[in-house]
Amino acid sequence: LAFSSENEEWHDIGLFDIETQEITWVNESAGDDTQPAWSRSGNMIGWVHSEGARTSFQFKDGSGVVKEKKIGDGVHSFPQFIDDSVVILYEDPSRPCDLWKINLEDDSIQQLTKSLDDELEFIPPEEVFYTSKDGTQVPALLYRGKDSTRAVIDIHGGPNWHLQFSWNPVLSYMASRGWTVLAPNYRGSTGYGKKWQNSSRYDMGGVDTDDCAAGVNYLIENGYADKDKIGVTGRSHGGYLTMTCMTMYPELFAVGSAVVPFLNWLKSHKNSREDLQHWNIENMGDPDDNRELWIARSPYFFLDKVNAPVQMIC
């Protein structure tokens, strides 16, 4: 049985022998390996390999070396073997998700479905790193708006998720309209190892807010935006971090837009499903024992700090 699971710092592909009950690891390397798939003969196994914002398809024949194929720097997913080829879903900033076929012997690539006309162009991002408040390097995707003097920090939700080189036409469209967009994979995000993902535990709304707010200095120092023309937006946990940015760093932002945020840890916890309550306690501790922390990280109690227009979509 092939499976994907945490193996120390990263997700790796494991093989569970049903008879001996033993586990062996296929490829212990830097990066997350997920979505294992067997060839029809059972002699070859493949998986999706992810490092930061980039992915690829990797495979291994028996005890042979690991080989790698990719269509581009975008997101590969759900591989299936067919004879000497693999059929896989692929998307990137210029193309929505489609089926592709990669021949594993001659490296030929064939697009099987086509969801977008060729004449449409979308501005692609680049992966950048900038310095947070404590000196930590934060990875992010940067969409450069042409001759831009204004920018927005777009914060992903989760927080256990991350932005890759995926199909995201909204951010490309904003860049085409003169906005530079910085999308940080702040501490708490997946994709950069277990230590990075867990580094915001018991510090939600703290170190992750610092990572997002530090993007303002990066944008100004690199000439992507004027200091009084930077906004912040996000959805779900990104909406929450939008509001912590607006209350903890009110001097940095000219405008904010928080989509389906929560503002009060205590009230949100009380009204949440049991599984979400469990997640809250795992990541912020007991609400009674850590009440001061829960209040300190709730924008609801600091709305008087906001000094710029804020749109809230709930």
Image: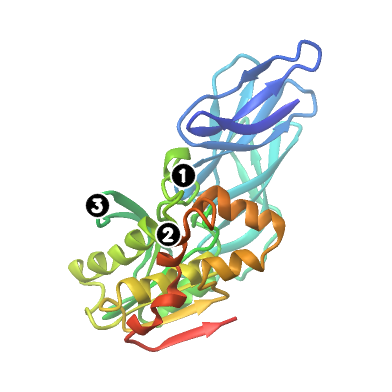
Q: CA distance from mark 2 to mark 3?
A: 20 Å
Q: Give the percent coordinates (x, y) of residue 152.
A: 37, 75
Hey, what amino acid is under mark 3? Asp
Label ID, residue 221: none
Label ID, residue 134: 3
Hey, what amino acid is under mark 1? Asn
State left or right for residue 250 relative to residue 76: left
Is 270 or 73 nearer to us in this picture? 270
- The answer to which image quadrant residue 108 occupies is top right
Q: Give the percent coordinates (x, y) of residue 163.
A: 49, 57
Is 57 or 103 nearer to us in this picture? 57
Hey, what amino acid is under mark 2? Leu
Q: CA distance from mark 1 to mark 3?
A: 17 Å
Earlier in the chain: of badge 2 and badge 3, it is: 3
- Check disc 1 and report the residue beneath it: 198
Q: Give the percent coordinates (x, y) of residue 68.
A: 54, 33
- Check disc 2 and report the residue beneath it: 293
Q: Is residue 138 positioned above or below 193 on the image?
A: below
Question: Could you tell me if the residues under marks 2 and 1 are in contact, i.e. CB atoms within 8 Å?
Answer: no
